[in-house]
Amino acid sequence: MKRVAMKVGPVNTMTMTRTMTMLLLPLALAACGGPAGGPPATTTTTPRPTATAPATTTATAPAVHPFTRQMEGMWHQYNGVVDGRNVPEEQFAGHGSLFTTDTWQWCMKGQPEGPPLVYTVSGDGPTYALDILWQREIFKGQQLGIVTIDERGELVTCIAPMGKPRPTTFESAPGSGVSLQRYRRVLGDWK
């Protein structure tokens, strides 16, 4: 019995080591830029500067629009008008949005639901252009809208249907398909 126990220990250790290697290897490759379910890795070489050629500069990430900093955080959607019709208030129970400087995540009672959308803001305000990029399997494309934070501190969005022109005012007329939404900032825990 002792021999069996001694053999089982090393076998279990080898099996555990092999299992951990198989689980962690794809993560390590992904962290190093290797293939881990994504596109094949590519390498580029930058020519070394010579006496006759100036050194190349590296590209920097685009600047974050200052208004996105004001949008950051959790917002509770409490009002909406779609295609000129008020959305019943009970449909907003627990609904919210979490904004970072470049993503918009729908939430239910403070918990994210589904993958986030990518958005950009441009313009000089107080009304800003809002471009939303959908990358979901069944819904891909770009929606155009406008966004502001009003005098009450509420976030207001007005978004056209996909493929339609950007709204110029915060209104949703019958037949327009435009969605007008109002949000209040969530302070503290989700209630």
Image: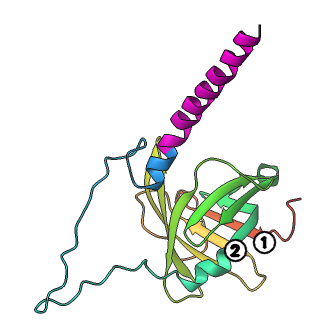
Q: Residue furthest left?
A: 52
* Residue 8 higher or lower than 117, as above or below: above
Q: Identify residue type, mark 2.
A: Leu
Q: Identify residue type, mark 1.
A: Arg
Q: Is residue 6 visible?
A: yes
Residue for badge 1: 185
Camera-nearest label, 1 or 2: 1
Residue for badge 2: 155
Give the residues drawn in magenta, as a range: 1-26
* Residue 39 placement (x, y as % from top left): 34, 47
Which residue is drawn at the image coordinates 74% and 66% (left, top)?
74
Which residue is drawn at the image coordinates 87% and 63% (left, top)?
189
Q: Is residue 84 visible?
A: no
For the residues labelled 1 and 2, the Cα–Cα distance comes to 8 Å
* Residue 4 higher or lower than 33, as above or below: above
Which residue is drawn at the image coordinates 56% and 76% (left, top)?
169
Q: Residue furthest front?
A: 3
Badge 1 or badge 2: first in the primary sequence = 2
Which residue is drawn at the image coordinates 81% and 53% (left, top)?
109
* Circles 1 and 2 in contact, beta carbons < 8 Å: yes
* Residue 6 higher or lower than 171, as above or below: above
Quadrant of the drawing holding the C terminus: bottom right
Numbered circles on residues, count: 2
* Residue 106 placement (x, y as % from top left): 66, 55
